[in-house]
Amino acid sequence: MSVRRHGSPRTVQVIRRLLRAYALRRVLKAVITVWIVVTATFFLVRLMPGSPVEVYIHTLISQYGFTYDEAANQAAALFAFDPNQPLLVQYLDYLRSLARGDLGQSLVSPGTPVSSILLSYLPWTLFSAGLGLFVSFVSGLFLGMLMAYRRGGLIDHVLTALGSFFQAVPNYLVAIVLIVFLGVQLGWLPVTKMRGAVSPGVQPGLTVAFVADVLYHAALPVLTYVLTTVGSWMLLMKSSTLSTLEEDYVTVARARGLSDGRIMRAYVGRNAVLPLFAQVAIAAGFVVGGSVVIERIFVYEGIGFVLLDAINRRDYPLMQGIFFVITLSVIAANLLADLLYSRLDPRIRRHPAEGDR
Amino acid sequence: MIDVQRPSCQPLLSVRDLVVQYQGASGAVQAVRGVSFDLASDESLALIGESGCGKTTLGLALLGLLPKAARIMGGQILYRTRDGRVVDVVRLSDAELRRFRWQECAMVFQGALNAFNPVLKIWDQVVDTARAHGFRDRTRIREQCERLLRLVQLDPTRVLDSYPHELSGGMRQRVMIALSLLLEPRLVIYDEPTTALDILTQRAIIEVLRSLRQELGFAMVFISHDLPLAAELADRVATMYAGRIVELADVRNLFYRPRHPYTRGLLLAVPPVSGPLTTVVSIPGSPPSLASLPAGCSFAPRCEFATDRCRREEPTLSTVAPGHWSACHHWSAVSLDRWMERLGGASHA
Ligand SMILES: Nc1ncnc2c1ncn2[C@@H]1O[C@H](COP(=O)(O)OP(=O)(O)OP(=O)(O)O)[C@@H](O)[C@H]1O
Ligand code: SF4
Ligand SMILES: [Mg+2]
């Protein structure tokens, strides 16, 4: 009896401590978000009148003379669910197949699982847009700090002007300008040869030839991502650095005789980057979604390219799969940024409740 | 040049005619306008004055730590190093200045609750400080630091392993005080070290400072706008008004025989320990804007002793008694009758 009485508060305590652990709460939140999105998608796609499933069934009936059952079976195979089952069973089946990575099959090329399409195209997008974001973020940080340290100087003025300009230009315009001028007018870049994600015939593997080829094909999309986003990272980092330079602890560090380099890295830089992490998370989340137009223009065969194709051809299961991936990437990026942020800012790690102070 | 040197001592620090100017958007203001004083190597000097009179600016100048907007327009800050050389802080190179800071002269900042880097543990910031001056023996740093933390009555193990936000304001200020002594500097500037703290914590900090100075014996400049607080720690007191030192004397002389109307006003504004609060008289008016100082004595608009001469002619700091300087034309007319009365009344009660 007394053991039970002692035992249960201890369990409660353990649970409470676990919930208080910042990382765990974040992961839990991310999982719940994914579940909500997945559930909402399920009900939207299957149950709403005029849903893709219904449209597909009706198309089969009216155009190809299927009976309702035949059409429903066909749809079930494609969308990975069985419309004749009770709703709850359907829902659980759906969750189960999602967990197994089964996202149904493409309408346009029947028999091809959506997941295998994702697997072959998504890496290219993650690679090119991710590389673009990384290069842009890192150079933005350095340039921003440089501008703040040289405030009012020539470098600051030139970079501010360039940054504001490129920030204002939409990325598709930059892409088109690159193709039209560098490719067509001046003929400096073989833009047609640079299409696709790899050249035909190049064997994948960790060879110099393959890596060079991959970079060659990704160069224009990456350049476009960097040109259009580095300006905002630069300006954000500049203003964040400027306000950090005003902080007492920077003056105190100088009074303590610390070297300028140490102050710049560990005192100014580390604190100035913190507020940018929320933004880089958002940017990382939109890597997949933001690739659509650029990949179309450069004919770079990533997931954005496929998505546009799927929309044009009304390939619902494929679209749904890609949207699912976009959602996942937004949530995963936010989670990653939160965890990183908490590693960098001890105020959040230890005292989640006071974290916003 | 006036002579504010104490007889028969080789000062650790001699400031001569120091002028510091801020270059603002709306023109230049001089926050320090020709300050001179000496400080012996075992001495504690309190720097007293209303907000905005240039105390912090003077402190920062002593460390060569003025912000970009400020410039030293003239004067010297002569410092006698451990090996007996006299250097002018104003003319030190960047590298020399970096070594001078904290190793020779440390500073605890005004309301410095934000004085520590929030993303580094206290111990890492201690190591940073020591390494910047070429001390790499972590065990020795640790020992020295633990000794100092115990002197300011903190638990070394706990504090060193904490992030700044995990410590209270009073604890942070104590850590800062301990850290200021890490490299055994011979001069420490305390810029209102207790301002942001509650009364009890203030008292504790003052006690800590007093015992530290007894134990370790370093010279100290204590900046404050609170006269009684400063008097507890100071050997000598300098009153500052509108960028100038207007009176400089031993703490007893300054308290009992002030020879400047501004110092007198500050003393009369101190609430009595006992007795009715009605005896408190605050100085009328407010400090002048440094951008548009009145002609003649800058205190004249608020001074009950002021005459036409005061509004015409600026008084300079001159000797009124041995070891006592005042910048007032009518210093001999200044006395503290009402203050003495009050003290007398209090002692009868
Ligand atoms: N960064 C700055 N730029 C321009 N002017 C400044 C700057 N810092 C201080 N000043 C001016 O210099 C004057 C003296 O400032 P300072 O901080 O030295 O005063 P203080 O005596 O320390 O005041 P307080 O008791 O409020 O700390 C102020 O009146 C202010 O107008
Ligand atoms: S010089 Fe004149 S105005 Fe200035 S403090 Fe003395 S008496 Fe007052
Ligand atoms: Mg100040």
Image: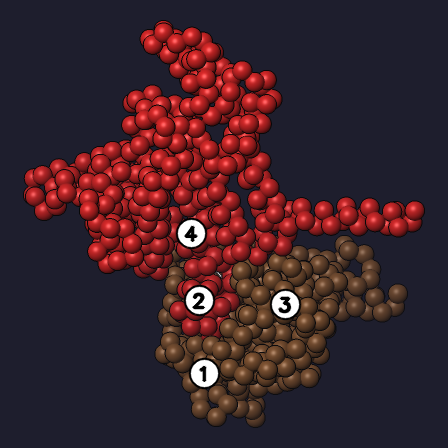
Q: Nearer the viewer, residue A134 or A67?
A: A67
Question: Dot 4 corresponds to which residue?
Answer: A240
Q: Say left or right for A8 vs A269.
A: right
- Chain assigned red: A
Whether pointer 4 and pointer 2 mark residues with C-beta atoms closer than 8 Å, the reply is no
Please tell me if label 4 and label 2 are on a single chain. yes
Secondary element at image label 3: loop
Badge 4 amino acid: Ser
Residue A36: image x %, image y %?
Answer: 55, 30
Dot placed on the residue nearer the N-terminal end, 4 or 2: 4
Whether pointer 1 and pointer 3 mark residues with C-beta atoms closer than 8 Å, the reply is no
Q: Colour of chain B?
A: brown
Q: Residue at x 48, y 48 (%)?
A: A337
* Front disc: 4 or 3: 3
Residue B126: image x %, image y %?
Answer: 56, 73
Question: Dot 1 corresponds to which residue?
Answer: B78
Q: Bin the neighbour count of mark 1 within 10 Å (Cα to Cα): few under 14, some 14-19, many 20 and up.
A: many
Snapshot quadrant of residue A304: top left
Q: Is residue A350 visible?
A: yes
Q: Chain of mark 2?
A: A
Question: Dot 3 corresponds to which residue?
Answer: B161
Q: Residue at x 67, y 46 (%)?
A: A19
